[in-house]
Image (spheres, helix red, strand yellow):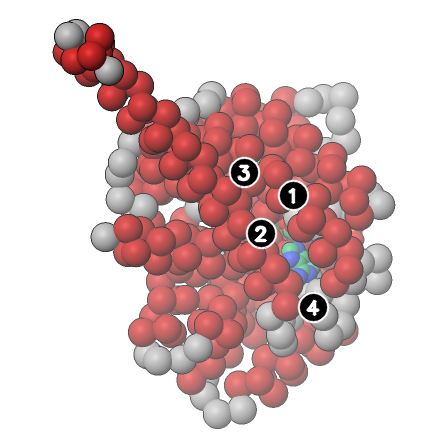
């Protein structure tokens, strides 16, 4: 100690070193919390009911090859991924590193589910949002939605735009995905375009709807239902086009818009209306899986905003 006192520069360096270590430890702890919130948001989406055409604990919706257990296995396989991509976001890692993490998460998901695609859209959307949120945290910026969106676009916007344009041509040895095939056939955007634009459906549709319903004093289930219907009314969901073509997509939009126009979850008996919609989608094998993923993304951002509020 006497030696340190004799050399204030050494003391400064030691304090600086300790502070840096502490910030690193705090940031890693934040990434663990963020990863837990991502998994919790996906779990919340899974258990929400009635959810038109989608899998829940009550039934398998329009799906014959997956159930709630398949989704739980998938979720369990993703818990390290959200932490890893958040840590990569802390240091604003280049897009190709995020992509490597996402591709191996997709492979783990497929192993966990026996080859069924449960969460590909979520791996992309929640993964990018975890990276952007952690990037804001490392720079001590407020964890508010518009700040996170701007950070995502400044940091990875160009790469996301290239990823969106590249599409099938980028990996000619691989079969094109449902999303790519449908996007070309119906001239609709899909997940890649949604990412390249900074997830407008999440920031401009789902999150405002979620928060508006909460502000009206209704609970988290009502808020999530309204946000899901707002997404279904708005989104070009390639999963819906893949299963139902343009007619299926029109039906999903029209039924969802009608639910909201009738008052959404503010209306008495909304559960029966949502259930009727569920049965109509199941009858036509329609499954708005893209909207389900983006609902979880909006829930994640809402929770992150609450964390920021606690930080003061
Ligand atoms: C970036 C990718 C996500 C690119 O995806 P791509 O455009 O190539 O399309 P898909 O592989 O089809 O996956 C896109 C998934 O995204 C969801 N989604 C759909 N529409 C939208 C939208 N407008 N906005 C956002 N997200 C959207 C959707 O996910 C849900 O659907 C899943 C089921 O889909 P699928 O298997 O096609 O359908 P089934 O009904 O099961 O088919 P069958 O029964 O007939 O067999 C469901 O589970 C939800 O998750 C789409 O599936 C990505 O693929 C990519 O590039 N990955 C590599 C990693 C990477 O580079 N990441 C970037 C850095 S993080
Ligand atoms: N609950 C769900 N059912 C079907 N597909 C989905 N994709 C994401 N969540 C889903």
N-term mark: 3 or 4? 4
Q: Give how far across and how far down residue 72 sits, in percent.
A: 72, 56
Using a 10 Å C-alpha cutoff, classify the residue at mark 1 as few (fewer than 14 neighbours), some (14 to 19) or many (20 or more).
many
The numbered mark at residue 78 is: 1
Left-right relation of 301 to 221: left
- The reply to whether discs 4 and 2 touch (Cβ–Cβ < 8 Å) is no
Whichever of labels 3 and 1 marks the residue nearer the N terminus, that label is 1
Query: Is label 3 in contact with label 4 (beta carbons under 8 Å)?
Result: no
Q: CA distance from mark 2 to mark 3?
A: 10 Å
Choose mark 4 or mark 1, whichever is in front: 1
Q: Secondary structure at mark 1?
A: helix
* Marks 3 and 1, how far apart at CA: 9 Å
Q: Do residues under tags 4 and 1 come within 8 Å of each other at their CB atoms? A: no
Nearer to us of marks 3 and 4 is 3
Compared to 11, does 140 lie above or below?
A: below
- List x then y, in percent, for residue 132: 41, 37
Q: CA distance from mark 4 to mark 2?
A: 16 Å
Q: CA distance from mark 4 to mark 1?
A: 19 Å
Please tell me how crowded label 4 is: few (under 14), some (14-19), or many (20+) other residues with Cα within 10 Å. many
Image vertical order of residue 93 relative to residue 71, above or below:
above
The answer to the question of whether label 3 and label 1 lie on touching residues, with beta carbons closer than 8 A, is: no
Residue occupied by mark 4: 56
- Residue furthest front as drawn: 2
| Beta carbon at label 4 within 8 Å of ligand 2 | yes
Residue at the location (49% across, 69% down)? 224
Mark linked to residue 39: 2
For mark 3, what is the residue? 83
Disc nearest the viewer among 4 and 2: 2
Image location of residue 20, percent across then percent down? 32, 24
Q: Is residue 158 visible?
A: no
Determine if residue 13 is in view. Answer: yes
């Amino acid at each position: 100690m006497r030696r340190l006192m004799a050399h204030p520069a050494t003391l400064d360096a030691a304090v600086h070193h300790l502070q840096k270590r502490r910030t690193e430890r705090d940031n890693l702890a934040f990434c663990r919390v963020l990863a837990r919130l991502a998994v919790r948001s996906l779990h919340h989406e899974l258990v929400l009911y009635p959810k038109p055409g989608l899998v829940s604990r009550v039934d398998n919706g329009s799906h014959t090859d997956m159930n709630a257990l398949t989704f739980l296995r998938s979720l369990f396989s993703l818990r390290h991924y959200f932490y890893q991509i958040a840590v990569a976001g802390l240091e604003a890692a280049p897009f190709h590193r995020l992509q490597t993490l996402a591709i191996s998460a997709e492979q783990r998901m497929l192993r966990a589910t026996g080859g069924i695609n449960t969460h590909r859209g979520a791996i992309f959307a929640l993964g990018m949002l975890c990276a952007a949120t952690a990037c804001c945290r490392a720079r001590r910026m407020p964890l508010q939605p518009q700040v996170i969106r701007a950070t995502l676009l400044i940091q990875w916007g160009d790469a996301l735009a290239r990823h969106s344009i590249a599409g099938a041509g980028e990996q000619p040895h691989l079969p094109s995905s449902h999303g790519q095939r449908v996007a070309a056939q119906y001239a609709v955007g899909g997940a890649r375009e949604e990412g390249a634009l900074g997830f407008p459906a999440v920031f401009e549709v789902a999150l405002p709807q979620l928060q508006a319903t909460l502000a009206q004093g209704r609970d988290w289930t009502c808020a999530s239902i309204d946000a899901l219907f707002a997404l279904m009314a708005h989104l070009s969901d390639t999963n819906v086009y893949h299963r139902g073509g343009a007619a299926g997509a029109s039906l999903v939009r029209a039924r969802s818009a009608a639910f909201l126009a009738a008052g959404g979850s503010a209306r008495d008996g909304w559960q029966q209306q949502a259930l009727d919609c569920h049965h109509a989608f199941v009858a036509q094998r329609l499954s708005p899986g893209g909207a389900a993923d983006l609902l979880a993304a909006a829930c994640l951002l809402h929770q992150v905003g609450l964390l920021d509020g606690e930080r003061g």
